Image (cartoon, coloured by chain):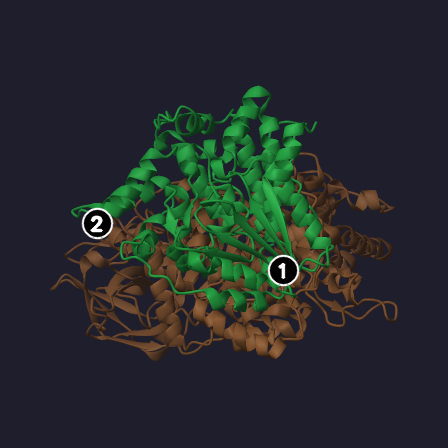
Chain colours: A brown, B green
Amino acid sequence: MSSESPTDRASRRTRILSNHLTTSDLQVGGNSLQSNICLSYSPPELHEKIEFEVRKMRELLDVHNLQDRDWLFGLMMQSKLFNPQEKGGKVFVMPDFNHTKEQQREMTMKRIEYLLERGVFDGWLTTRGPETEMRKFAFMETLGIFDQSLAIKIGVHFFLWGGAIQFFGTKRHHDKWLRDTETYRIKGCFAMTELGHGSNVRGIETVATYDPKTDEFVITTPCESAQKYWIGGAANHATHTVVFSQLNINGRNQGVHAFIVQLRDFDGNICPNIRIADCGHKIGLNGVDNGRIWFDNVRIPRENLLNSVADVTPDGQYKSAIQDPDQVIFSCCRFAAFLAPLTSGRVTISLSAIYSAQIGLAIAIRYALSRRAFSFVPNEPEVLLLDYPSHQRRLLPLVAKTYAMTCAGNYLKKMYVKRTPESNKTIHVVSSGFKAVLTWHNMRTLQECREACGGQGLKTENQVGHLKGEYDVQSTFEGDNNVLMQQVSKALLGEFIAAKKKNKPFKGLGLEYMNEPWPVIPSQLTSDILRSSNFQITTLRLRERDLLNRFAAEMSQHQSSGVNKEYAFALGYQLAEDLGRAFSDRIIFETFLNDEGTVSTGPMKDVVGKLRSLYALTCMEEDAAFLRYGYLSTEKAAAVRAEVAKLCSELRPHALGLVSSFGVPGAFLSPIAFNWIDSNAWSSSSA
Amino acid sequence: MASQNSVMAYNDQVLVEEKSLTRILVLNRPKQLNALSYPMISRLLDLFVAYEADPNVKLIILKGNGRAFCAGGDVAAVVHDIRKANWKSGAQFFTKEFTLNYVIATYTKPQVSILNGIVMGGGNGVSMHGRFRVATETSVFAMPETALGLFPDIGASYFLSRLPGFFGEYVGLTGARLDGAEMLACGLATHFVPATKLSLLEEALYKVDSSDSNIISAIIDCYSQQPYLKDQSAYKRLDVIDRCFSRKTVEDILSALERESMGKADDWINNTIQSLKKASPTSLKISLRSIREGRIQGVGQCLTREFRMVCHFMEGKLSKDFFEGCRAILLDKDRNPKWEPARLELISEGMVEQFFSRMDDEEWDDLKLPSRSNFVLPRHAIAKL
């Protein structure tokens, strides 16, 4: 239904009429009546068949809180705050990226207030348990589909600030801050990163000194490199922050601790002894007000120390279960208290990356199902982009990967909400690997989708190009992807050494297969073998196992030649990063295979099976390690490649169904995903 | 087997007038307020299909004989069929009706529906999906299904969910009646023409020799006027409607309304609360979810989903509220239905979910919509897919 007012409509029609008396917007009665000299938009819904039930496929991907997601989609679509625009007869919602960064930030905040009022955040911090956490994840994913800035601004407030209070704080902090955070009476941010230190939190330079005379801590930024940097929410809106700082008591450094500091009063004025500057315009995420903070001997009450692991008594006694200052936050608690908020961050980032890839692919594939270029035979109609095998090869393996990684993301989410002290290490390793692989996959997918949409991909309204800027940061924040990959390999090496030294079987991280004899890859790779999950898992495990052995050998070689352990790791970066990927690919495959097993026999299972094969074979085709170390001979690698092309052509007829199952509503895609001729018509531009 | 009666009904209950390149279809069951019978739906479908292929037809006008446009589908007859045979014979009605709704929604030629008098339920299915909907000062719109133990069907989850804000939830859940001015304001009607000018409008439309919707629209514009939206109109309460009907669940909507009504005597809010309390709790929950899903689905998906839902109601395994509602409102007319379950909190998400699943019956298939791939659809139809 048109949102135009009747008067607008009337005057527009009159104008159109005078221009178009000779033309008709209808070609009645099918294409036999008149020859089309002009292209007309032919909606893929009319000529593509969907052979499986989209609702079921969406359930396989979205899994949980589907009604909650749809409700939230609707909340956004039905409010003017989400900038609805009619293009080609359809309404799209998307932030106005032509706004200045100040305007974008204000709109983000207004949207948060609207969502708050409608009850979206009810219980986010005041109720606990797996159900609440899954609902929060579903909402974060849905919000990110509208705008990454919106999701991040909310994520900083609830997961970083709120999470820090929950995990590092004790009852007195929970009672004082959580409810006010949930209702946005206060707005929180998370001041960890400094200009001089990002991933290496131990090196931060901000200092908190205890003053027993006044029962206060004094927080100081001692030098320019200690300014807090990239602090989301700090530039405009945050009233409070949790500050990470070295704790100095009687001249002794007790290591990094977290403190609550008020930044602004309730009228928005910056508090005394605090200086805040803007991080400026960015390549994306301009709806998030990233700021820089300096503390000029800011005094805060002793109670503002988040004291779940260590406390300071009024007379200045330092009390902690752990003696070594360096260990307070980084040792036994490394995988528990301290990193818990960051782990949830990595889970959220992984999932939002995958939803972004879904948006990109849904747009690029829908466009490729309606846009034609060149013909195979002169004077014949031009060919749909997706009917070119090369176009299939560009996009469909990315669809298969996105399916596999969606399942992987769901596995990670489930593991996270069911976390126990024993599973924390696995969560840390898996979330590190997934965060890197999924965010890289998204960036690569968006670039391919941008190119696959040609010039149309360059228009901000068409999303695919613009999203690259919005999502690029994901490979950096909450742990640089390369560093994370090396951490994964470090953890795997730890398992390897432990098993070899103690002569005990591998247990955990899915490495149990390493207790079995080395596998043999069949000498002849027929299509049936290539498509068997047995061959696929065996080959992916072979790569991981061999890389781990090689990595262990290289480390021990370096160390036996006198290189220290940390430097040996730095030297072994090549194998470390290959191994991190091999580990992640293998788990992703296993989760996908597992989910395939839940699908009952029928057309949907057939399609999921093909996707799983395409995922596995694409992994083999893309990583040179399979050839470099001879897991596949050149002949076998060629067979893999041929099968990839074959699978692409078999999945081509399912393309529309596959991207429809992502469950991203049309309003959150873009004009080129629908009637791009009409949305570009003169009458649309002059209306 | 077509009996003598049904052949007569087929011919008499929809009258056809031919004027140049315009076809006027008149719903002709005035005593029943033109409630859609199976023969009427069959006839309409046949006519729409035939006109689409006929180059001598450029425009279709749909109107009602007498004081109503159409009071809805003839559900009393459907219930009768089900009692006589089985639920599948009742469901046939909906197969035909929803197919007609889909053809209308994706029609290649403009349809002008003259919504003079009552337009409810199934009457909306044959008009709202068309290109032009002309309201008058006598128009009375409603989707009253929740009071009948059903849900707004006929593709209503498509068009209600696309009304401004959360007006669609309000209209669909409460069954609120709208007048012509309100229909225009919210977009259910595309034009408002005073009843006295309808014959002039029709005559002007008889002369049309084009299917160009811009031309048709401009003609209707000549007879249109801007009606007065009454002060107590629900549409002027859109802010309250948005605040309350945007809530996640029916229970949340009710408590939001109750919060709004606290400390003030507001008839409109109290009536709204009362309509919700009178409606079938099962219907309310299913209707809300249907509208929410409809908002992110195309019209074809909406109709196939609603078809599943309606089949569950006809089968009566998951809920008998539809039969109870028909008994209380249409047959016994005691207006005192005994809903089962009787309270919202007794209906779990899992129970709601079942209405959206495929029928557990090997001999029963989902709705198969007719292929429209041989037609070049106009832009407004493409946008609905």
Give the left or right position of residue A677, taking residue B29 as reference.
right
Q: Residue B43 at x, y = what percent?
A: 64, 41
Give me the chain letter of mark 1: A
**What secondary structure is marked by label 1?**
helix
Residue at the extreme left: A213
Q: Residue B85 at x, y = what percent?
A: 60, 21
- x 65%, y 66%: residue: B210
Which residue is tagged 2?
A: A172
* B319 vs B183, nearest the viewer: B183
Q: Quadrant of residue A441?
A: bottom right
Which of marks 2 and 1 precedes in the sequence?
2
Residue type at numbered disc 2: Arg
Q: Quadrant of residue A303?
A: bottom left
* A153 vs A104, nearest the viewer: A104
Structural crowding at the residue carrying mark 2, measured as other residues with C-alpha within 10 Å and reported as few (<14), some (14–19) or many (≥20): few
- x 53%, y 75%: residue: A14
- In the rendered view, tell whether residue B226 sits above or below residue B250: below
Determine the CA span between mark 1 and mark 2.
47 Å
- x 56%, y 54%: residue: B130
Give me the chain letter of mark 2: A
Q: Nearer the viewer, mark 1 or mark 2?
A: 1
Which residue is tagged 1?
A: A361
* B93 vs A431, nearest the viewer: B93
